[in-house]
Amino acid sequence: MRTLRSIFAVMALLACAACVKDNSLSEFRATDELCIMIKGYTTFSYSPLTCQKGYNSTQHEFRVHTDNMSDFYTVRLDRIPTGTGQVVYGTVRWTTGNNIHSKKNVPFEVVRLEGKRIWLWSSKNSIAAVV
């Protein structure tokens, strides 16, 4: 009986974790601002008063940073996607506090494509970015 209760408790926790993941992805898809989310938390978002953005078409690299570069994120893709559902690979760099983080060869699914903006989601790494 105790084992059965433990199994149900674990199943309930897994179900809750799945809901949190779905909610953060839904929230991400709904956002219109340039931002990066790591594990469901917005790590950096663009503000036109204090930030700059840039794009290098040769390297397929997107940059969003504060005016003094104290906070930033960059996403370099292997190619520019043309539609939703596509998977592209990229390198991501971002800051948190005094640290700079980096992930290479990240598989991103294009979950939204509107105008010149691309919504990228990596379920494997729990990274979401609007570029």
Image: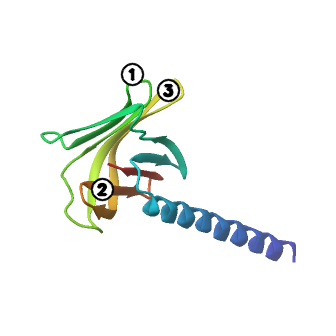
Q: Position of residue 20 (x, y in %)?
A: 61, 63
Q: Which residue is mark 2?
A: 118
Residue 76 falls in image quadrant: top left
**For this rendering, which residue is in front, 11 or 27?**
27
**For this rendering, which residue is in front, 13 or 72?**
72
The residue lying furthest to the front in this view is 49
Q: CA distance from mark 1 to mark 3?
A: 16 Å
Q: Residue at x 49, y 26 (%)?
A: 99
Q: Is residue 50 above or below residue 10?
A: above
Q: Position of residue 90 (x, y in %)?
A: 29, 47
Q: CA distance from mark 3 to mark 2?
A: 26 Å
In the picture provided, is 39 more to the left or to the right than 30? right
In the picture provided, is 31 more to the left or to the right than 59? right
Q: Hey, what amino acid is under mark 2?
A: Ile
Q: Which residue is mark 3?
A: 99
Q: Hey, what amino acid is under mark 3?
A: Asn
- SS at badge 1: loop
The residue lying furthest to the left in this view is 58
Residue 65 falls in image quadrant: top left
Would you call the spot at circle 1 few (<14 residues within 10 Å), some (14-19), or many (20 or more)? Answer: few
Would you call the spot at circle 2 few (<14 residues within 10 Å), some (14-19), or many (20 or more)? Answer: many
- Numbered label attached to residue 44: none
Indicate how the structure is coloured in the image: rainbow
**Given this view, does label 2 or label 1 mark the residue nearer the observer?**
1
- Numbered label attached to residue 68: 1
Q: Badges 3 and 2: C-beta atoms under 8 Å apart?
A: no
Residue 122 falls in image quadrant: bottom left
Q: Hey, what amino acid is under mark 1?
A: Asn
- SS at badge 3: strand
The residue lying furthest to the right in this view is 1
- SS at badge 2: strand
